[in-house]
Image (cartoon, rainbow, N blue to C red):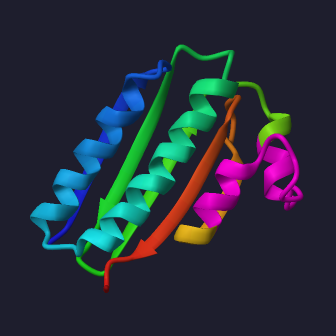
Amino acid sequence: MKVVLEMTLPRDAGSAPLARHTLDASLRGLGVASEVRADIALALGEACANVIQHAEASREYEVRARMDGLRCVVDVIDGGRDGAPDVAGAAAGAPLTAEHGRGLQLIRSFTEELRIMDRRHKNGAIVHFEKSLAG
């Protein structure tokens, strides 16, 4: 079974729990183990927090998730400025003592295939991560 979620959310603190709970409910429905769901929820929460805190040029952001029974692929897309310093610094491997970038380090630790990309033909960035659904 393949499940695709697409959410457009307001850039406020209340939207991150909604995104996490919606994705978690889909994963639970697919029978994904709680430990794997917790890793994905943590990563999604950190990616949403990054957008909420730093994408000042946008009032909304998008969360897109695809699950096929084997993997969960998530994109958190903001409409902020290109090359946001917090994203660029974390992508380059900000030191553990850095004030910013710890969220992306957590995402990297709990998921696979973390990539931070500029949006093509639009301002903003995409935080992309994947996680195997096998426990």
Residue 83 in sight in this render: no
Q: Where residue 34 appears, x then y in whole percent?
A: 25, 69
Q: Where residue 15 appears, x then y in whole percent?
A: 38, 26
Q: Horizontally, is 119 left or right of 49 in the view? A: right
Q: Where residue 102 appears, x then y in whole percent?
A: 72, 51
**Residue 10 vertical placement versus 7 (above, below):** above
Tell which residue pokes out farthest to the front in this image. 97
Q: Residue at x 83, y 41 (%)?
A: 99
Q: Residue at x 50, y 55 (%)?
A: 43
Q: Residue 114 sits in which quadrant? A: bottom right
Q: Residue at x 80, y 52 (%)?
A: 90
**Residue 86 vertical placement versus 8 (above, below):** below
Magenta segment range?
87-108
Q: Where residue 61 appears, x then y in whole percent?
A: 49, 28
Q: Horizontally, is 51 left or right of 100 in the view? A: left
Q: In the picture, which quadrant includes the C terminus?
A: bottom left
Whether residue 101 is in magenta: the answer is yes
Q: Nearer the viewer, residue 82 or 133?
A: 133
